[in-house]
Amino acid sequence: MISLALIGYGHWGRHLARNLTDVPGARLAMVSDIRSEQLAAARERFPRVSTTADPAQVFADPSVDAVAIATPLSSHYPLAHAALLAGKHVLVEKPMTANSEEGARLTELAARRRLVLMVNHVYAYAEPVRALRALLRDGTIGKPYYYDSVRINLGRFQPDIDALWDLATHDLAILDRLFEEPPSAVSAVGAAHLSPAHMSIAYLTLFYPDRLLAHVHVNWLSPVKVRRIILGGSEGFAVIDELDRAEQVKIFDRLMASELDKNATGDSRFDNRLGEMRSPKLPTVEPLSTAVRHFARCIEDGTAPLTDGNAGLRVVRLLEMASRSLAASGRPVELSSVPPW
Amino acid sequence: MISLALIGYGHWGRHLARNLTDVPGARLAMVSDIRSEQLAAARERFPRVSTTADPAQVFADPSVDAVAIATPLSSHYPLAHAALLAGKHVLVEKPMTANSEEGARLTELAARRRLVLMVNHVYAYAEPVRALRALLRDGTIGKPYYYDSVRINLGRFQPDIDALWDLATHDLAILDRLFEEPPSAVSAVGAAHLSPAHMSIAYLTLFYPDRLLAHVHVNWLSPVKVRRIILGGSEGFAVIDELDRAEQVKIFDRLMASELDKNATGDSRFDNRLGEMRSPKLPTVEPLSTAVRHFARCIEDGTAPLTDGNAGLRVVRLLEMASRSLAASGRPVELSSVPPW
Amino acid sequence: MISLALIGYGHWGRHLARNLTDVPGARLAMVSDIRSEQLAAARERFPRVSTTADPAQVFADPSVDAVAIATPLSSHYPLAHAALLAGKHVLVEKPMTANSEEGARLTELAARRRLVLMVNHVYAYAEPVRALRALLRDGTIGKPYYYDSVRINLGRFQPDIDALWDLATHDLAILDRLFEEPPSAVSAVGAAHLSPAHMSIAYLTLFYPDRLLAHVHVNWLSPVKVRRIILGGSEGFAVIDELDRAEQVKIFDRLMASELDKNATGDSRFDNRLGEMRSPKLPTVEPLSTAVRHFARCIEDGTAPLTDGNAGLRVVRLLEMASRSLAASGRPVELSSVPPW
Amino acid sequence: MISLALIGYGHWGRHLARNLTDVPGARLAMVSDIRSEQLAAARERFPRVSTTADPAQVFADPSVDAVAIATPLSSHYPLAHAALLAGKHVLVEKPMTANSEEGARLTELAARRRLVLMVNHVYAYAEPVRALRALLRDGTIGKPYYYDSVRINLGRFQPDIDALWDLATHDLAILDRLFEEPPSAVSAVGAAHLSPAHMSIAYLTLFYPDRLLAHVHVNWLSPVKVRRIILGGSEGFAVIDELDRAEQVKIFDRLMASELDKNATGDSRFDNRLGEMRSPKLPTVEPLSTAVRHFARCIEDGTAPLTDGNAGLRVVRLLEMASRSLAASGRPVELSSVPPW
């Protein structure tokens, strides 16, 4: 039986706690938060779990095997570092750290201590993303052309990160699962409308080899909510629309070259859809549940998580490159200009 | 009675012809097209209109007052130039010319000859765009923050222009109407997936003074059709969804600063919508009809069109800057680096 | 070459004319309308077609082979009757006649004269309806359970028919194609809100053998437009949404009995969708074009149309039964209470 | 401090419990359920609440002031009756009872004992329904023409009620709040496709004075989920779409008579929408929370609930009339044919 502790019982921490109490072979033993009213809420909800305002008590407790960290970004590194030093396995929220130096240090420490370090890239465990990955692997999409994601709504303004680090992280985590190779360069533009330090809108482009383009639009100040990913390729298309509960994934049959040829020279019109569309039945499981069970299994089996420290570090590096490009009005930042990964 | 001639009777030319025959105080007298089957179709549809395969006959005919040009882009300049030289007023399809040198020359020629030169930026005459302009002027939007446009579908591959020049032109024409000042810089990224010379997907960013950002996503290879513009500002939002016939324009009440403040520090969530939404009743008039009537009125009154040669030239210059940035993976191109306008 | 005449050049007549001019092996030779401005519009649009205000000239013209009738309902019978007497094939708009006596007489006359009498049940020729029929035939739907149609919008108030006769006719024509057997009884309710003689809203139920139920909601005074048919059966479902251009037909996999059983006793929830959904690629052809070509082929081949006079009569009889039930607040009217068909 | 007990800790009981624990001036003291695993779940979730398998213990406990009943329909009457006899205030789930005799007896008993008897017609407390009621009262809708509700999805098959009693109850409760007068007659049709005793689809019509029509479509076997109410009147329209989170209520400006007149005789088309549409900002409060707080306030103040026993009885009587009409294929059942209310 793995004994789990949770540090950070805010909005997301509550979701984590609910899922952590439902992992076979594990139990949530401890919750830590510096806010006393949050601890009271945790006790009310989980009367058998012990609580503490001091995370050091978590690390000092020899009965705790693993720690989940759901605190503001700036504290990810010190808390995860202390947990690893204390010999605990770590599940840390995304982005893993506030910069890549911290990320690299965590990754090295976990490797040296032979501890599981998992970043909670929760979308990597979502069924629609797993379906997309399968469609790329089985040839349905063909050679990938583009990945276009829109992730906008009237959102929470996070205290210590901006819309890019908050929302684009999801897409970088998904892209890390979809494509083998890293992007060769990144370009980003954006603006901070309400508070100077916080980009509230950003557009991120990743240039992959062989003309594959990924583009992400994140926006905290949109009057409409959109959560839609389009994946286009030589043989077909897939669309994830998170807000369409009934048809989250749609797959469109491949493009017929002959229609394209006719069109390239003539005056005729494409039809709006190509071939049959189908929407597969996906398992209805909460991605966070899949993620925390994966974490427990990795601890039991001593295997590396799909979203290990290296994956977390790759995402943080791309976020850093994006922020750098954004400060330079979209000037592309080459992967070769940053330390190797 | 203004006597009009139309050069180019393709897909769009047919729409033009239908509207040109319905302008009070004007009549469509002549249609020219190099394709004989198109001329036959024009005769079938408009039996009283004379037809010719040679545009020179249009220019030579002293009874023709004005010429509408709906041909492939590369021929815009020679045809419009010849028409102006022959003393005809000109309505030319967008983009006005294939480059800004040609555009500048046309504009100068029209000014010298005191002829009306109008670019058919048809969106500038669309009711939803006029509504947006009014919302900016009357303070409903407040200080504008961003303009975000998505213009994607499985489209026609045009023979001599790419998706950027084909589709983003609409947004540049709209932006030219919405905002007084030009953007200070442009960044664009894209990819040519099916034919090397044709960007089939492109993302265009325009940097305006005071942190106003405009972004345009155009795509000829999207499995879903989207035509949506979001305008965000300090006091409110407006959304144009062209495909929502019943509610093309939605206006959202202003953002309340207090909610933002609470959110910036706390853990609470914004509601998905702010204040009341309303969707005004707009006149149901075809934008092309408004445009061609405006052209006729400008000829009668000797006034400059809203979308005159200078507007056409501004749009072409931005397209050139975008193409330049696109070739450099998003490196921003400053307005100050191109000749003044 | 079949020579066609059209009587009635109103809104729908113009659509008919456009399609009648595009039938291989046939030509539109004559247009008749009592309104001189409509005849002028017809001449403007089709300069080679002769026009007349007097339908008697159509019937008297020996060169005319067939007549299409698109006039108000009350004149369907006298015009179609005169046309058949004059030896012309007849395509008459739906509903075929204002009552079943007239319908029966037309059907008999056409049979006696061996002339084609086709009712323009245009939905019977629509690709989505053909797809539904195929899904019933091939077992995808299984035993049919229900047909539910919603056909509402803010509509034209027709001068001489109400919403029931105007809109429900479409569904009765579709049902006539989908199911072999007639309904055993009809129940209808409704109300006339704006003009006493005109039901502006009506709900029609048809009871078929073996618990198959069809229900149709028609409404001329709805603020939202809906055109949706749901077909439910023991093995699957199909939905036609006319306003969803991209996905007009959706087919849902069959219901799993085991889930039902579990649910009948327990507290668990069904998932919102069952199995995979697919949306087939349908030919993009205008149903009216298919219909008029079918009419021409039946004349050439001497075969009976899919929607012949008998089909038209069946639909009129059901409309009469519905109106009778409606006047009695939904009291069911048995098929056995009306003359046999 | 009101001490509350809950009988029935199933799916809906859990929602009730969550809200009952959040009522100012009240506390959830006891939970009863005959299923031991449900009691265990209740203890886990609410460790301070006592539990019992025997409802008699609830009634016998003098510290319990009020009882909420969320059990299968057949047990509503015996449990509520026993609770009232024991001097407890009662909140009973809808429908109040399985027949009107039971309902009348409960109502009388509560009146005699001067206890609060509230039926949990939760929609009566929903913000969109309150908005609709206000629009009727303030003249925005004008004279009401029709109420059309579609409440369909692939649903749970309830053990002891059918789709009519399960789902149409919501609309009857809403109608009871919207309109002063009762309907004069009811007509219903339906079919039981999966289990003979369970109507899985039903259509219910209520005839109100002065041509006001209400129609409700309920369906447990629909592949698509719809929850939409349209309210039409002489001055305007309102639409509640429960599944459109951002715009639950839309209000459409009044119909212009002149357009109608023109249309009644001519061939012109209505526009799809009339005047401006607006979607008001509604408080985001869970209806169930409003309902249980209302119950507590009625106990404190000794006032009658909006949805008291009489309202519950009116709804049950209409359900009985509907079932009677349904068994007779839609034959209308007059209100005057049932005992007075």
Image: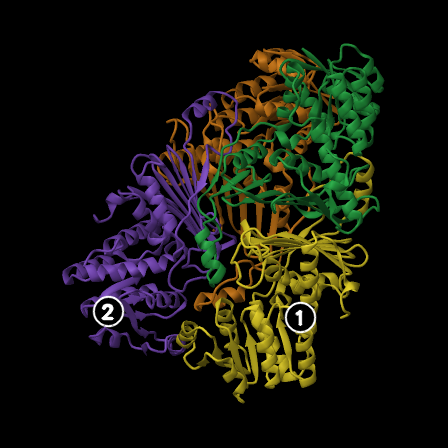
Chain colours: A orange, B purple, C yellow, D green
Q: Is residue B129 above or below residue C2?
A: above
Q: Position of residue B260 (x, y in %)?
A: 44, 25
Instruction: Give the total number of marks visible in the rendering.
Output: 2
Do the residues at pointers 2 and 1 share their chain?
A: no
Quarter of image, res C163 = bottom right
Q: How crowded is the residue under tag 2: few (<14 C-alpha within 10 Å), some, or many (20+)? A: few
Is D249 situated left or right of C95 in this image? left
Is B257 situated left or right of D143 in this image? left
Residue reaching furthest left? B112
Q: How crowded is the residue under tag 1: few (<14 C-alpha within 10 Å), some, or many (20+)? A: many
Quick check: can you spot residue B67? yes
Q: Which residue is mark 1?
A: C312
Q: Which residue is mark 2?
A: B1
Quarter of image, res A79 = top right
Q: Position of residue C45 (x, y in %)?
A: 41, 74
Quarter of the image with the C terminus of chain C is bottom right
Disc 1 element: helix
Is B149 situated left or right of C316 in this image? left
Q: Nearer the viewer, mark 2 or mark 1?
A: 1
Q: Is residue D238 above or below residue D309?
A: below
Q: Nearer the viewer, residue D184 or D250?
A: D184
Q: Image point 20% across, 75% down: which residue? A: B62
Q: Are marks 2 and 1 in contact (CB under 8 Å)?
A: no
Q: Nearer the viewer, residue B91 or D226?
A: D226
Say what amino acid the circle numbered 2 marks.
Met
Q: Chain of mark 1?
A: C
Quick check: can you spot residue A341? no
Q: Is residue D98 above or below residue D277?
A: above
Disc 2 element: loop
Q: Position of residue B310 (x, y in %)?
A: 23, 53
